[in-house]
Structures are given as structure tokens and as C-alpha cells.
Amino acid sequence: MKPLFTILNLIFTGVLLMSTPTHAKDTMTQDTLIVAGGCFWCIESDFEKLEGVIGAFSGYIGGTAETATYKHVSHGGTEHYEAIRIVFNPEKITRFELLEYFWRHIDPLDDTGQFCDKGDQYKSAVFARNKEQETEALASKKEAEGILGEKIVTEILRETPFYDAEDYHQDYYKKHPISYAFYRKSCGRDRRVKALWGK
């Protein structure tokens, strides 16, 4: 029985290896985009609905400290933004398409924060890893300005270290759907976005 088991085991392993190229290919084509759009619960929820987005993760970026926590960032003064790191498959959705979606889910005219959340930590921003990404982000910003007919105050900044937020912030909208829905509605996010961008 043992030789038969070994043969079957080898066949099973071979089948597994033959069936994984697609997954390996997806891993090879992953890319990331970091944006800040106010409360990271909301912007994370918005992006995780998109086909081609593998996941969105809440965190902090932009400050000079070597790490960041919600306790410190939420009080302001650390120069960090509440942001999300979007992991996506560029074969299914492009960076430019993600940026177009981003503009239409924030208030890019507000330089004091986003919706009911005010303070530097809640300002909107796009973070670029290099000059090419910066040029693309500026082009998408210009396109959005043309649609709105107003100057966008959202900055395009150079990407700095991103610190994942605490576990209880990740997928908050899934873990606490009632409190999340109440917060989002009372903050006026969707109402303001609709007023700016329409349906």
C-alpha cells in the first residue's frame, strides 16, 4: 500500500502545481495605490467594492515619526493622514481608473478635512511612489477639475512609509455594520459626494 500511496501523493502534488499558475500570475501582477480620503473606514469600504481590487487596508502615512497609532494620529499634530493602501490587479483595473474612482468618492474641494471630520489627519491626498505615478495622478486631478469646473485642493504627495492601522479598524464596516452605517450617514459623506458629482 505504501508505494501506491506515494504514487498517488506525487500525482496529487503534480495536479496542485499544474492548477496554480493563475494564482501565481495574480500575485505577480499585484500593485498598490495609497490615498487619503478622510475616515479610512469609509474609503476602505468604497474601494473594496471594485472588481480588480484585491483588498484595501486602513493605515497612516505622511508623518515623520517612525510609527503611528490611532491614539496619536486622531489627536492631530503628527502630520500623518488616515489613509488606505489599495492592493489591486492592474490587469483588471488600472491605476488611472482607481484615481478616477477616488475623486468621485471624496470632497476634493475641502482643505480642512473630509465631511464631518476636520483636521490635517483627515485631509485628502494621493501618494505617488515615483515621478511617473505623480504625473499620472496630476493628469487625473486635472481631468477631475475639468469635470467639476473648480480647483481641487487635494495634494499629490510623495509616498512615505505606510503604517497599518490597528486590527479593530481593518474592515470596520464589515465587523460593525450598524455603527458604521450610522456614522457614515450622520457624517454626510454620501450626501456631499452626490451634491458634487451627481449619481
Image (tube, rainbow, N blue to C red):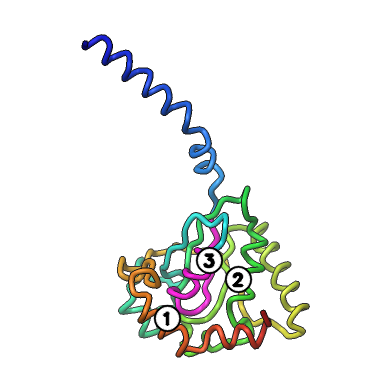
> Mark 1 = which residue?
181
Task: Confirm whether the magenta stretch covers residue 107.
Answer: no
Q: Nearer the viewer, mark 3 or mark 1?
A: 1
- Amino acid carrying mark 1 in the image: Ala
Q: Nearer the viewer, mark 3 or mark 2?
A: 3
Q: Residue at x 39, y 67 (%)?
A: 171
Residue 118 visible in the snapshot: no
Please indicate whether residue 175 sits to the left or right of residue 47 in the image: left
- Secondary element at image label 2: helix
- Amino acid carrying mark 2 in the image: Phe
Q: Which mark is residue 102?
A: 2
- Secondary element at image label 1: helix
Number of residues whose C-alpha sits closer than 10 Å to that of mark 3, classed few (under 14), some (14–19) or many (20 or more) = many
Q: Nearer the viewer, mark 2 or mark 1?
A: 1
Q: Quadrant of the C terminus?
A: bottom right
Magenta part of the protein: which range?
32-48
Q: Which numbered disc, 3 or 1, marks the residue that appears first in the sequence?
A: 3
> Mark 3 = which residue?
47
Number of residues whose C-alpha sits closer than 10 Å to that of mark 1, classed few (under 14), some (14–19) or many (20 or more) = few
Q: Which numbered disc, 2 or 1, marks the residue that appears first in the sequence?
A: 2
Quarter of the view holding residue 186: bottom left
